[in-house]
Amino acid sequence: MRRTRILTAVLALAAGLLAGSPSALAAPSAPEVTLAADTYTWKNARIDGGGFVPGIVFNRSERNLAYARTDIGGAYRWQESTKTWTPLLDSVGWDRWGHTGVVSLASDSVDPNKVYAAVGTYTNSWDPGNGAVLRSGDRGASWQRADLPFKLGGNMPGRGMGERLAVDPNRNSVLYLGAPSGKGLWRSTDSGATWSQVANFPNVGNYAQDPTDTSGYASDNQGIVWVTFDESTGTAGSATRTIYVGVADKDNAVYRSTDAGATWSRVAGQPTGYLAHKGVLDATNGYLYLPYSDKGGPYDGGKGQLWRYATATGTWTNISPVAEADTYYGFSGLTIDRQKPGTVMATAYSSWWPDTQLFRSTDSGGTWTKAWDYTSYPGRSNRFTMDVSSSPWLTFGANPSPPEQSPKLGWMTESLEIDPFNSNRMMYGTGATIYGTENLTNWDSGSQFGIKPMVQGLEETAVNDLAAPPSGGAVLLSALGDIGGFRHTDLTKVPSMMFTSPNFTSTTSLDYAETNPGIVARVGNLDSGPHVAFSTDNGANWFAGSDPSGVSGGGTIASASDGSRFVWSPTGTGVQYATGFSNSWSASTGIPAGAIVESDRVDPRTFYGFKSGRFYVSSDGGASFTASAATGLPAGDSVRFKALPGTKGDIWLAGGATDGAYGLWHSTDGGTTFAKLSNVEQADTIGFGKAATGSTYQTLYTSAKIGGVRGIFRSTDKGATWTRINDDAHQWGWTGAAITGDPRVYGRVYVATNGRGVVYGESSDSTGGGGGGTDPTPTGACAVTYKVTSEWSGGFQADVQLSNTGTTAWTAWSLGWSFPNGQTVSQLWNAEYTQSGAAVTAKNVNWNANVAAGSSVSFGFTGSWSGTNGKPTAFKLGDQACTVA
């Protein structure tokens, strides 16, 4: 169980990575850059979950339409046919990385095609941008953005409360948004396109987790935390009259308007001394249910109560399932069964030990039963069974003593929803996954109901480091926040367990021995115990090393090329070196504490370091380092560098900030000198993969800005030319932590994200024949694949792949087709388009104009249809007919 969310991006971003100030160390003017195009397929290395899911939202008018929000990893839509989740915010780019944090979601029950997301990750200085409300008319396939004049906090304290964003169920052009930081209540009357503050709302909130926190994180006013409409007080097309609003104020937590938001007043007689985490209305019985906690969550909470408010009479009733004196937790998750009014469920979200608790009532809170009870302490009797075989790591490799069990029922259980169309289906979010059941009503009949992960497709890990060994069973090794990391032997399958012995709360760095990849080292954070571990079987099994004095965190570690020695730069003390598996560490000299360390991939006695603009070299196994004379490197510490396998002293260094040196540097003399690549404006990561056919140099991969475009890039010619391999639909916010190619599969690349897990790409160019920029002559000879990837009532999403099947490359392309059933394009990405009647023409944009012979380019679009959604049967590249796959 993990009590902290690792903020992979915070240090780099706070250091000015995205600052808008001009460069103080201007690089020579870059020549014009030609970017080639390639078609990549992007997937996740499956982990399934791995982070906190604070919100699950079911649409109230369409069966099987549900959404989930994460605190740093975007939003998802449920796909009933496959029982999986589809990511919806992968198009969020580098400059707006904060919009991957989702503080609230709202699904429109009047028009189920519409969905809204309130986005922004931090309200303090960690996030340089303001929040926004995203709106979609195609269930999240594409979005429009309304910027807000304040920040939102998808990863701030109180993020499990809500929902802060709500659509009027009678007049769906009206929405409300509860803001943090004293910004009050906001309203839109044009379906989320524009927003204005509700000037007469009387209370902006006053609760902060820790008012003394100087970082602004825990000291932020949690503000307006939920909005609930009483749909019975309106008619279709007219604004709902009665609206309830929850405020982070222990003495004044609930407000109401009975005139469609014209005036507001504190609800009389309400309980005090607690925060109302949610307000869930049963309009059939006229009850508003409120779970209360003494804290804002999602980690803290020591006391709580459940209350029911009768909307017709104004009567408040304490319906707590246990006496307040017996609580050591707060209540937060709360749901009602829309098929069986009077059935209510709630969670003890902050019951960390021995387990979370679920409560259920079938008489509107008059009486309750629990998901588990003590028999004879410490024995337990469970009303549920748990099957985590699809995500076996959820046991965390634990073997606890009763009354704890493994796997746990959960922790941080602030989201809990019964399917409004199916009394047997319930989902709830935890700090690590989404659990669910499809036979919930067994609870009432006295038999056990089955709980299992319902999380496939939702990937929510923050990635700190990646390694792809050249041999051995491990295809990929990952260093992750919160759940440590994994050894993938098959990217399409969930590994059986995270790294254990020891279990780091977060792994900060790992490395393998280049010429002996059975040897792997990792370092990380742990509340108590060693911060370093080793494996001699390619990461399958681990044993703990010992810490030198003063270590408080993982830092970075480097393995000698043959695995004979290690250099470690931990948090809390200086750089250390050891021969063998760290029975005894010794302090390195000549290198400052906190330096980033790496090893030469050929010479086992050569190690490298970087700190504050200086590069350091050791030739005696890490015992002593000497500062290089190299100048012009980034002055800060937002740097990643690696040595090339197979060549001694070949080093690539990426990093910097916009107020100083920023880019990609290359050294061929062991760091004595570095040359900056003039065709790379900014770069933040560097990695190597299998060389292209006919090339003797490994393929380079980077998360960078090249030719004015931010993206993931590949070069097969030592950086002379670059191919952008992602596209605008696949950006994943911040990708600056790590990248590596696969040494065994040409074109495969692994990308670290801050909340969307490990993303990997597979190239349609299997040999590298189209690896760099070219100056070709266009020709015809083309093939097209048209695929409808998602379809719903009145709308659809499609992907188009255009392949160059000729013998020469294209410098531009224009693809035309006609829809057979009058379909219209709503939005198209990775190309420009025009439509006249049924005829559509899609043309290249600047970065994907060049398509090498044998390569492909892809674009996608959303559209509308009526009656039939037939596929086009003919495509033309200019005047040349294409083969249709």
Image (cartoon, rainbow, N blue to C red):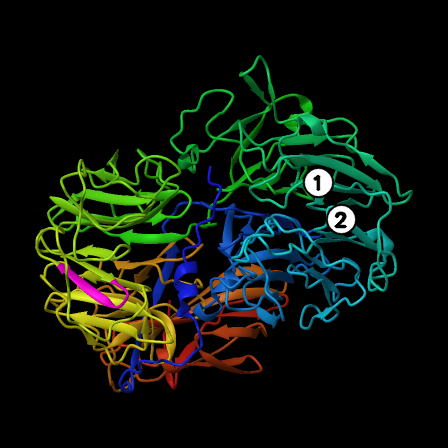
In the rendered structure, which amino acid carries the disc numbered 2? Ala
Query: Which quarter of the rendered picture does the C terminus lie within?
Result: bottom left
- What number is the disc on residue 420? none
Q: Is residue 304 magenta?
A: no
In the rendered structure, which amino acid carries the disc numbered 1? Tyr
**Within the image, what quadrant is residue 629 found in?**
bottom left
Nearer to me, 214 or 602: 214
Nearer to me, 149 or 66: 149
Would residue 742 be seen by someone viewing this image from the given angle?
no
**Within the image, what quadrant is residue 473 found in?**
top left
Helix, strand or loop under label 2: loop
Residue 384 vertical placement versus 723 (above, below): above
**Given the current orientation, which residue lies at the most extreme top position?**
376
Q: Position of residue 271 (x, y in %)?
A: 79, 40
> Residue at label 2?
253
Which stretch appears magenta? Answer: 611-617
Neighbor class of circle 2 (other Cα within 10 Å; few <14, some 14-19, many 20+) is: many
Residue 1 vertical placement versus 670 (above, below): above
Question: Nearer the N terminus, badge 2 or badge 1?
Answer: 2
Q: Position of residue 507 (x, y in %)?
A: 34, 46
Helix, strand or loop under label 1: strand
Q: Position of residue 397 (x, y in %)?
A: 38, 31
3D distance between C-alphas at marks 2 and 1: 10 Å
Q: Is residue 814 left or right of residue 834?
A: left
Does the CB distance between marks 2 and 1 fall below 8 Å? yes
Q: Is residue 612 magenta?
A: yes
Residue 578 vertical placement versus 384 (above, below): below
> Residue at label 1?
292
